[in-house]
């Protein structure tokens, strides 16, 4: 069974970022961040003990669980309760823990790609195909993302990869290229609230989402809003 991830935090909002230089933190914020970093270390613990000869499906699962664990920590209530300046500075340091994991996952993924270019649910397993997508979705290598998107397109049409996975990667590639998204999966912060980034042909977005197996825009926004502002 494909593992269910936190759509609002893990998939939509937690884009890979290059953190700016870390600003000074107050003593309270330093203590709060130290507690967060201890949790982050636990998230990454299985990566350090994974055998080099582990099966690809096992490695995918362990790597994805580590990065998803880190992304879930982005919603840590103790960090969210910090003053705005401390929260922003802490966020930079939090991303400094996550970005190297994304980069390492990407480098590893390139070494285990199937000979035909991408993972298929029928051959490699639905979990493996989904886990590989999560790694590429959060990859800092935008050129590789675009390359994988092209490989996934025919597989999405035949059900060998999930339509929703293809749609979310499509939107991310479009946004990184400076173009409007197509499926309404990507959000930006506007006046302290999350709002959809610009959408090409917004009148047809609900039909496109339905075709790809995604929830309605209203349901998705409600889920995101339930996690608080930005």
Image (cartoon, grey):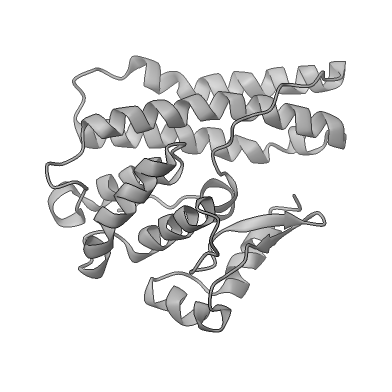
Which residue is painted at 38% across and 71% down in the image? Answer: 212
Looking at the picture, how far across and down is residue 104, in whole percent?
39, 25
Image side of residue 37 versus residue 179, left or right: right
Q: Picture coordinates of residue 224 (x, y %)?
A: 64, 59
Q: Quadrant of residue 91?
A: top right
Question: Which of these two is toward me, 141 or 70?
Answer: 141
> Which quadrant of the figure has residue 21?
top right
Instruction: Please name whichever residue, 213 or 206, is drawn nearer the observer in this view of the structure.
Output: 206
Q: Indicate left or right for 171 with 120 as reference.
A: right
- In percent of width and height, residue 36 lies at 66, 24
Q: Is residue 26 left or right of residue 4?
A: right
Point 27% across, 33% down: residue: 110
Residue for point 76% across, 53% down: 229
Vertical side of 186 occupied by 58: above or below: above
Q: Which one is in front, 79 or 84?
A: 84
Q: Is residue 94 above or below residue 6?
A: above
* Vertical side of 54 occupied by 115: above or below: below
Task: Say which quarter of the image contains residue 34.
Answer: top right
Q: How many marks?
A: 0
Instruction: Give the residue drawn at x 57%, y 40%.
Output: 72
The x and y percentages for residue 10 are 53, 46
Outermost residue, front direction? 178
Image-based side of 50 in relation to 194, left or right: left
Q: Examine the rendered structure and indicate whether residue 15 appears above or below residue 106.
A: below
Q: Nearer the viewer, residue 218 or 167?
A: 167
């Amino acid at each position: 069974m494909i593992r269910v991830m936190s759509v609002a935090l893990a998939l939509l909002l937690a884009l890979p970022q290059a953190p700016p230089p870390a600003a000074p933190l107050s003593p309270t914020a330093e203590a709060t961040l130290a507690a967060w970093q201890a949790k982050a270390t636990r998230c990454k613990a299985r990566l350090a003990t994974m055998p080099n000869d582990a099966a690809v499906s096992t490695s995918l699962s362990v790597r994805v669980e580590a990065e998803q664990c880190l992304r879930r920590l982005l919603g840590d209530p103790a960090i969210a309760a910090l003053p705005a300046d401390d929260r922003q500075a802490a966020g930079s340091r939090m991303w400094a823990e996550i970005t190297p994991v994304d980069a390492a996952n990407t480098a590893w993924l390139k070494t285990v790609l199937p000979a035909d270019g991408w993972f298929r649910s029928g051959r490699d397993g639905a979990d493996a195909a989904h886990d590989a997508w999560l790694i590429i979705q959060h990859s800092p290598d935008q050129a590789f993302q675009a390359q994988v998107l092209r490989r996934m397109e025919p597989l999405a049409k035949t059900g060998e990869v999930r339509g929703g996975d293809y749609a979310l990667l499509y939107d991310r590639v479009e946004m990184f290229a400076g173009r409007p998204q197509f499926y309404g999966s990507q959000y930006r912060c506007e006046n302290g609230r999350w709002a959809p980034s610009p959408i090409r042909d917004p009148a047809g977005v609900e039909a496109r989402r339905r075709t790809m197996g995604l929830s309605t825009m209203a349901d998705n926004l409600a889920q995101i809003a339930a996690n608080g502002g930005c």
